[in-house]
Amino acid sequence: MLRRFLRASARESAAALRGDPGMPRDEIARRHALCRSDACGQYLALDDRCAECGCSVAKKVAWRTAECPLGHWKALTPIHIAEDRRPPP
Ligand code: SF4
């Protein structure tokens, strides 16, 4: 989980350094509402956390490069997530 967080953080930092547009508030709210609806069955309401990836949902939905690991919402900025999904060597 730490490695996944560090990669996500690096992607978000790179997007900020490139000057990619920030997240619109309405998109943050839309993503958060999707998570809170628990259509995925992975939303942990007690601590606002995603059971699938372990992330804090409030933080995850505010990152332009983040995306739902189950495809319920997409990143605003193109990202390279394939490295996160590669099987271990
Ligand atoms: S990020 Fe995706 S899997 Fe996680 S709580 Fe939100 S909708 Fe569910």
Image (spheres, rainbow, N blue to C red):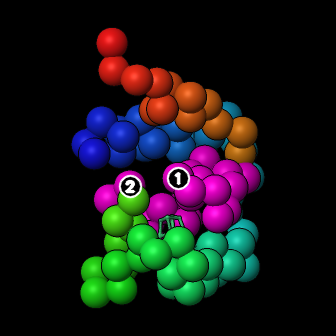
Residue 73 relative to residue 4: left or right: right
Examine the rendered structure and indicate whether residue 44 appears above or below residue 69: below
Whole-percent x and y of residue 52? 39, 59
Q: Earlier in the sequence, mark 2 or mark 1?
A: 2
Numbered label attached to residue 51: none
Magenta-highlighted residues:
53-76
Give the residue type at disc 1.
Pro
Residue beneath the point at 56% across and 56% down: 70
Residue 64 shows in the view: no
Q: Secondary structure at mark 1?
A: loop
Residue 71 relative to residue 42: left or right: right
Q: Residues within 10 Å of mark 1 (few under 14, many from 20)?
A: few
Residue beneath the point at 32% across and 59% down: 54
Which of the two residues, 13 or 27, is positioned nearer the viewer here?
27
Whole-percent x and y of residue 59? 44, 66
For marks 2 and 1, give the CA distance.
7 Å
Residue beneath the point at 33% across and 12% down: 89
Residue 54 relative to residue 75: left or right: left
Some atom of ligand 1 lies within 8 Å of the CB belonging to the residue at label 2: yes
* Predominant SS of the magenta segment: loop
Residue beneath the point at 46% across and 32% down: 84
Some atom of ligand 1 lies within 8 Å of the CB belonging to the residue at label 1: yes
Residue 48 shows in the view: yes
Q: Which residue in the protein does label 2 denote?
A: 53
Q: Which residue in the protein does label 1 denote?
A: 69
Q: Secondary structure at mark 2?
A: loop
Whole-percent x and y of residue 71? 63, 56
Give the residue type at disc 2.
Cys
